[in-house]
Each structure stands twice: as structure tokens, then as C-alpha cells.
Amino acid sequence: MSTGTVERTGTFLNRRKKKARGEGDLAESGGFVWTTTAWVATLIFFAPVAWMVLTSFHTEADAATNPPTLFAGLTFENYSALFDRGVTPFLINSATASIVSTLLVLALAIPAAYALSIKPVEKWTDVMFFFLSTKFLPAIAALLPIYLLVKRIGGLDNIWVLVILYTAMNLPIAVWMLQSFLAEVPKEIMEAAEVDGAGTLRVIWSVIVPIITPGIAATSLICFIFSWNEFLLAVNLTATAASTSPVFLVGFITSEGLFLAKLCAAATLVSLPVLIAGFAAQDKLVRGLSLGAVK
Amino acid sequence: MSTVAEAQEENAAPPVRRPTGTSARSRWVRRAPLLPALVFTIVITQVPFLVTLVISSLHWSALTPGDKSFLGLGNYNEFVGLDNYATVFTDNRLRSAVLNTVTLTVGTVLISLLLGLGLAILLDRRFPGRGLARTLLIAPFLVMPVASALLWKHALYNPTYGLLNGTLNGIWKLFGADHGPTVDFVSSYPMPSVIAALVWQWTPFMMLILLAGLQAQPTDILEAARVDGASSTKIFRYITLPHLRQYIELSTLLGAIYIVQHFDAVFSITQGGPGSATTNLPYEIYLTTFRKFEYGEAAAAGVVTVIGTIVVATFALRVVSSLFREEQAR
């Protein structure tokens, strides 16, 4: 096993990761007991999710039995009930708020990360820490003035207010992540482009962006997840027209009373986009969750 | 403005990663890409907080508005200085909210860190289906927090047909009993119920970061230790744990910062109750703002929360900046 080969062929993005490990040297420790333990632990953690999905396909009568039934007939009626109850506008609002704010975040964060890494401005670490420190400001502490202002300008129940707030919420994370990706772009490439006469914007757009595409994808994913799941701002700043999926979920339970199967269907449906995105890009999650500090 | 001239000017600087611009113009060229993000962040996050700071010094109840206008946003009664802070620190509800926030945060972070470490160690080994196991394990973190809170409250904790009681019942029946015990988890054990739901949600987060840490261990040192005859326990104690330290610190502090601010589970599972047994600071502030309409008090409580978070965050910044320096040094 040659670590050297891996180091040489590995891209600059995962220099730190010793891929060679885990491929060979731990083979002897995959004992039956540990494998079983790992799987049992995994299944215990996954059980509530599995239960949610399974119950969502049961009828209300089958869902509310004690002891629980695993093998009842499956039905889509809970999902069609959700769409009859008008979940679609909420999903569209969530998608609008998440996707548009993610695009805005990228538009603001890519140039900022460029200024903080490729040709750093003076005191650039201070600026980085300023961005990070805004994540330590609990949203609840800034909510009151935002609420009063939004109410004053007649912006309550307007999806674009959420778009702007989600952009601010995710921008610091994105700056940190993108900075960590940009710091790994070889300087020679940019210098070559500049020698060839490319301006700053041109260099960012045609040279840097293509190289850090994986980083941009990871950043978008994290921003999307946080916006899609956000509840505090959504529940306080929207009423009906601009409400997002989590607000639908809470309102649905309150107005419908407790119908377990429908609750599970609703919970599954609103979690689905993030589950799919997260499963598809799980290798990128770690770096995003740790603001790029862990590769 | 000629881009070629600009490029040459930039190019004249030596390729060192330090600000070397000499003229004011080149410094502004350098700053320009940063400014939109910086200005936006300051306007949306810092300005509202400053306003909160001002509101915290006012006697302002939206139910009985006074005659003094606050920037045209509403009418307050009078300027009261630090009175709201005195209320915050003497009010029983708020004091218990502070305690609950600490319990919730420390409990959730510690338990999910330990479970996450255990899972990370298990998943660091190669075994059949490891990739699938990892995928299944991160699901709790991806489920929408409000959805997972409602799922726990209704599908798992429900005394009559929740999964937990249902399973207890099923086990009891296996042994010939008529029915199992019925535990009303949320009413009887409100705080553990909220913590359990949050632990379930945050363990995958801890696991992911710690697993990344485990997999970034230098292979040669591990191999050398093994060749020298070190036992697995010793390798873990003397090589793996010290190596993991910064990952443990990072995941603890990031987790703590998010959980201090946590709102969704308290809102959905217990509504802060019974009484105020599970009311944490964010939920208490929410109630003070949108149920009691005591804007001044809510603002003061918000400022206190920020100060508390900054205390935690100071440690966090130290950890992150040590990782960051290491990054720059390489």
C-alpha cells in the first residue's frame, strides 16, 4: 500500500485525507461482533425515520394501534390528502426562499471569499472572524426590530423578506467555506490568467469558479439545507401567503388534530428534499458543517 | 479603466499571500469584491442587534403603548435605563429559562458527543455495508427539525399509540402480561424528552466531524505503533484521542452554539411546559415578544442571551482560530 501514490494522484482538495487508510489496513478489525454492533446502533438511530416513512403509508386506523403494526396494507391516501389540503404553495415558498437565497449567498460570498483568500485585504482574518461572529448572534435577539421594521414597511407575509434574511443567515457560513476552498486554488493558474490579460471579474468567473465548483456545490447544499429547515423566522414573519413547509407542518397538526399517519406523511414530504440532497452529497456535508475547518 | 493596466498593477506585487498593495487605489480594488457581502451582513445582522440594545432600555409594552415614537416603528412609554435587565435577572421565569438553556445545551452536547464518538469509532472500521450505514445514520440530522420534533412528540412519545409505549406493551405481552406500562414521557419527563429528541438529531453531526477526524489520522504513525506492539486501547488512548482533540472541541462548540439558540423542539414538543420546565431562553423571548408583548423585557432578555452566547463563542473562536492558523501554516 503506497500512501505516496495516493498523495500524488489525489487532487489538491483532499491532500489532507489519507485515502489509503481504511482501504486496507483495518481489514482485520472488521470482526463479526463489531459489525453487528455497528449495524444495531445504526438501525436504532434510523428506526424513527423508518417508522415515520412506514407510518406515512399506513391508514390512520393501522397507524394508531398498540402494539404497533409493521405489516399493514400500504396506501398513498395520506399523501394525496396533503396535496388536497394545499401543501403545494408551502413547498413552493420553501423552494423559492431556499433556492433564491442560496443564489444570492453565492453571488455575495464568491467575490468576498476571493478578496479574503486569493489577494487578501489587510486584516483579512479579522474580517473572517467578524463574519463568523454573526453566527453567534441568536436570531431571536435580532427578531424584534426586524419584525417591527418589516411590519412597518408592510412586508409581513412576504417571501422576499425571508429570502433576504436567509441570505444574511447563510452568508457567513458560505464565506468561510468558500474561503477554505479558494485557499487551495494554485496561485500559478491565476497568475497565468492575469498575465494573459484577464481582469479580476474575468479571473473569478473563468478561472476560479470552474476550479472550485465542488466547493460551490457543497456551499449551496449547506445553505439550501439551513434555509429549507428554518422555522423561527418563518413562523414569526409569515402568515399564510408566504409560509414555508415547517410552518405548514405545525399549522397542519394544529388544525387537523392528531392524525398520526397524516403527520408522518407531512413530515416525510417536507423532509424529503433535504434528505435527498444530503444523501446525494454526504461526502461534502462534513466540510460544510465544520465551516470548511475539517476536510 | 483598462483591465490590462489593472492586471499589470496587481501583477507587479510579489506573489505573497499578504496584503502588499501600496496605493490607496489598489487597496480599494482589492476590497471591492468584499464590500457587498460585508455591508449586507452588517446591515442585516448588526443594525437590528443595536436596535435591540436600544429597545432593551425602554419601557415598551405593545398592549399599552405610550406616546413616544420609536423611529416610527411603534410607541413606547419611557426610557428606563437598566430596569429591564433588573427584571430579567430577578424574574423567576427568566432565571429558570437560563437554567433550562444550560441544562438543555450541556445535556444534549455531552450525550450526543459521546454517542457520536462511539458511532464514529464503529464506522471507522471497514465492515459490510459501511457506506449504507453512514447514509442511514446521517438521516436524523437531515430530517427537518420541526418534523423530527413532531415525530418524537406524536409518533414516539404518545402515551396511547406512540412507538415507545407500543414497544413496551409488545414486550410485556410477549411475557404474558395483559398490557405494558403506559408512560407519558412528555408530561412525566419533559426535559429528558426534549434532550433525547435533540440528541437523536445532533449525534450524526458529531459523528460526521469525528469520523472525518478519525480518517485524517496519519497512517504511518498508527502502523508504527502497531508494529511496535501497542494494543488497540493504547493506540486509542495515546494516539487517536490526542489527535481527535481539536475535532472534539470543534464539534462541541459548533453544536453548543446551535443548541443554545434552539427553538424548534421546545416550541413543538413541550411549548416550554409543563409550567416553564422546558422553556429555554429563545422560547421565553418568543413568548415575551409575541404573547406578552413586553418588547423592552424581551429585548433585554435577547441581549442577555447574546452575552451568554458570546461567552461560549469566545472559546469557540479560540478553537476555530487554532484550526485556522494550522491551515495557514501548511
Image (cartoon, coloured by chain):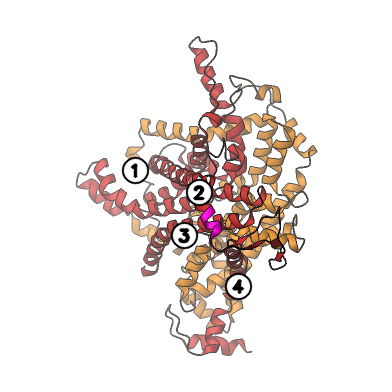
Chain colours: A orange, B red
Is residue A283 visible in the rendered image? The answer is no
Residues behind callouts 1 and 2 on a single chain: no
Decide which of B272, B76 is in the foreground and name it.
B76
Decide which of A69, B199 is in the foreground and name it.
B199
Which residue appears at 65% of the width and 22% of the height? Answer: A72
Residue located beneath label 4 in the image: B39
Which residue appears at 59% of the width and 51% of the height? Answer: B285
CA separation, marks 2 and 3?
14 Å
CA separation, marks 3 and 4?
22 Å
User: Eyeballing the image, is B298 above or below B271?
Assistant: below
- Mark 1 vs 3: CB contact within 8 A: no
Residue located beneath label 3 in the image: B310
Residues behind callouts 2 and 4 on a single chain: yes
Three-letter amino acid code of the residue under disc 1: Leu
Three-letter amino acid code of the residue under disc 3: Ile
Residues behind callouts 2 and 3 on a single chain: yes
Three-letter amino acid code of the residue under disc 2: Ile
Foreground mark, 1 or 2?
A: 2
For mark 2, does the 10 Å Cα neighbourhood hold few (<14), some (14 to 19), or many (20 or more) residues? Answer: some
The magenta stretch spans residue B272: no
